[in-house]
Image (tube, rainbow, N blue to C red):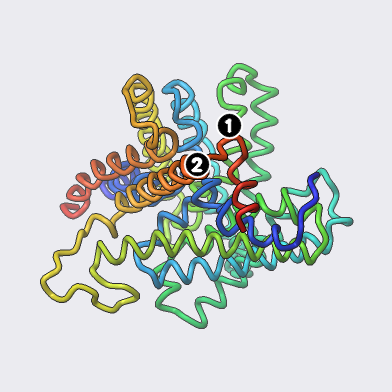
Amino acid sequence: MRQTTPQADFLRGIWRENPVLIQMLGLCPALAVTNTVANSIAMGVATFFVLMGSSLLVSTFKRWIPHEVRISTYVLIIATFVTIADMLLEAAVPTVHKALGAFVGLIVVNCMILGRQEAFASKQPIGRSLLDAAGTGLGFMLALLMMGAVREVLGNGTFLGFSLFGPNFEPWVIMILPPGGFLTLGLWLLVLSWIERRRAESAKVAEWPAGVAQRRAA
Amino acid sequence: MENLIWILLSAMVVNNFTLALFLGLCPFMGVSARVETALRMGLANIFVLTITSLCAWFLNAFVLPHAPYLRLISFIVVIASLVQIVEIVIKKVSPALFRQLGIFLPLITTNCAILGLAIFQTNRGYGLVEGLFFAVGAGLGLTLALVLMASIRENAELASVPELAKGMALVLIIAGSLSLAFMGFAGLLSSA
């Protein structure tokens, strides 16, 4: 396995290997609950909490988890943290909990979380695993916010409930309905690949992988 | 009886698991390149969903009243183990069926549609028969969405698509249009 710096572990998940936009993991929540910014934030925070908790436990106990039943063990650990998150949300912000509905429970089957356990936390020391989890969790939150902002602004004319365009704005209702989720993510992917191509053309370093070029520039 | 038919239809088209509720997106994106594979994936889904519905009903009726905080954990553990057992049985009893469905079964078990079905069934308070109709409807809906998607993608391969849109962006925009088409079924439910 390639050696990485702690900084790279943290930064990688936020943008260059963003779980939703690049790896296409955790799509269910990214499409289902992003019809308002508030819901996106709540889902992002809950997932962040579950990811940090699971990575901490998996990384701590990696020596004692038998290889044959590791996936089931990870799922059990994740399910435990999701149950905690579910109860905390219900107690602290009942309205948001109601709006998210079944999707809080469905954090268990968010493949991004299981993926980080299998790919990282089960092999790395605790500190590194927490950094990796924090980066990935923030990347997930960022992607949800990008989805939620576009959908709420266009679909409802508001941002976090504040009206942006005044009463004459005709909301694009379709954006807060299910088709809007698919379309918004599709459009974001188009924008990202367009930016990526622009950068590749202007940097004239096409023979380097994109990541190398970015790191040199930083 | 009429009520049961509505549960089935509603889960199948009006609240289609994939296109309206975003459940089971991984197979929807991953296994929808060929119609034949998509169809087999759909059948395997109907099968696992039915087992899930039985499990969820059993847990809801006999176990969870005593320990409600175990809901998520028990759903996922019981469903995963039962599917595993059924997989072993099928392999023994009918190797032909196993070859058709087998490779998909482990993939499906941790699919959000499965846990989603168990949670929805619980939240809506469905009994045994209602749950089974709900599961079959949801499974048929998933199959329908998968096969439609696969047919479109098979044709889209021959179309000239801009370089930028190739891959996931195109799939998502097609899914958006399909989802839009399925919104048309919303009127069905209000007349019920």
Q: Residue B104 bears which disc, if any?
A: 1
Q: Residues within 10 Å of mark 1 (few under 14, many from 20)?
A: many
Relative placement, left or right, of A121 versus B26 is right
Question: Residue B115's spot in the image, x, y percent?
Answer: 53, 52
Residue B76, visible in the rendered structure = no
Q: Residue at x 69, y 37 (%)?
A: B85
Foreground pick, A36 / A149:
A149
Task: Name the secondary structure under disc 1.
Answer: helix
Hey, which residue is sitting farthest bottom in the picture?
Answer: A92
Judge from the rendering whether residue B110 lies leftward or rightward of residue B127; answer left or right.
right
Q: Chain of mark 1?
A: B
- In this view of the protein, can residue A125 be seen by the observer? yes
Q: Position of residue A5 (x, y in %)?
A: 76, 58
Q: Report the residue at 49% width, 66% height from top.
A: A43
Q: Check the residue under mark 2 and report the chain it is in.
A: A
Relative to A85, say whether B73 is above or below. above
Q: Is residue B162 left or right of residue A42?
A: left
- Inspect the image, locate mark 2, and give the three-letter code of the amino acid beneath it: Ala
User: Label 2 crowding class (10 Å Cα cut-off): few <14, some 14-19, many 20+?
Assistant: some
User: Where residue A200 is drawn, which disc sits there?
Assistant: 2
